[in-house]
Image: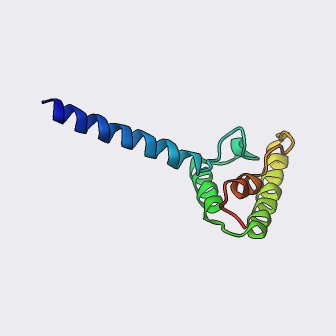
């Protein structure tokens, strides 16, 4: 019985540790770090997140972000919304995590 507990405890610890380690190497978009978040549908947010984490090249990421910001600016104008200034650069965050070169 004690052996089973030890195995379960070891497996649980390994799972928690690997999840925490994996999380530190990922970046997720959210309303605090994504320009125009409030103007995007849930599906657009998912697609935006997937697109960003698919990049391996910094300049390609920057081009995409520039296009995204212009698109969100257009939506904001159409909807009469004032977007807060850009504070975060997801390309920089991904570069800092070693995802972009």
Q: How is the image coloured?
A: rainbow
Find residue 92 and report its image quarter. bottom right
Quadrant location of the C terminus in the rendered image: bottom right
Find residue 51 and report its image quarter. bottom right
Percent x, y of residue 39: 71, 45
Find residue 15 and report its image quarter. top left
**Residue closest to the eye, 46 or 23:** 23
Residue shown at the point (29%, 34%) measured from the top left: 9
Residue shown at the point (58%, 46%) measured from the top left: 24
**Residue closest to the eye, 5 or 24:** 5
Residue shown at the point (17%, 35%) measured from the top left: 3
Residue shown at the point (76%, 47%) measured from the top left: 35
Percent x, y of residue 50: 58, 59
Residue 71, above or below 81: below
**Residue closest to the eye, 55 or 3:** 3
Quadrant location of the N terminus in the rendered image: top left
Q: Is residue 39 left or right of residue 7?
A: right
Percent x, y of residue 14: 37, 43
Q: Is residue 15 left or right of residue 9?
A: right
Instruction: State how many labels appear.
Output: 0
Identity of the residue furthest to the left in this view = 1
Percent x, y of residue 23: 54, 45
């Amino acid at each position: 019985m004690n052996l089973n507990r030890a195995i379960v405890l070891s497996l649980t610890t390994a799972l928690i540790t690997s999840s925490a380690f994996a999380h530190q190497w990922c970046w997720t978009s959210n309303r605090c770090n994504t320009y125009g978040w409030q103007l995007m549908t849930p599906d657009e947010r998912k697609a935006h997140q997937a697109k960003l984490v698919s990049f391996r090249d910094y300049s390609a990421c920057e081009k995409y972000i520039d296009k995204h910001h212009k698109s969100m600016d257009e939506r904001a104008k159409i909807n009469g919304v004032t977007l807060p200034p850009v504070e975060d650069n997801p390309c920089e965050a991904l570069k800092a995590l070693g995802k972009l070169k």
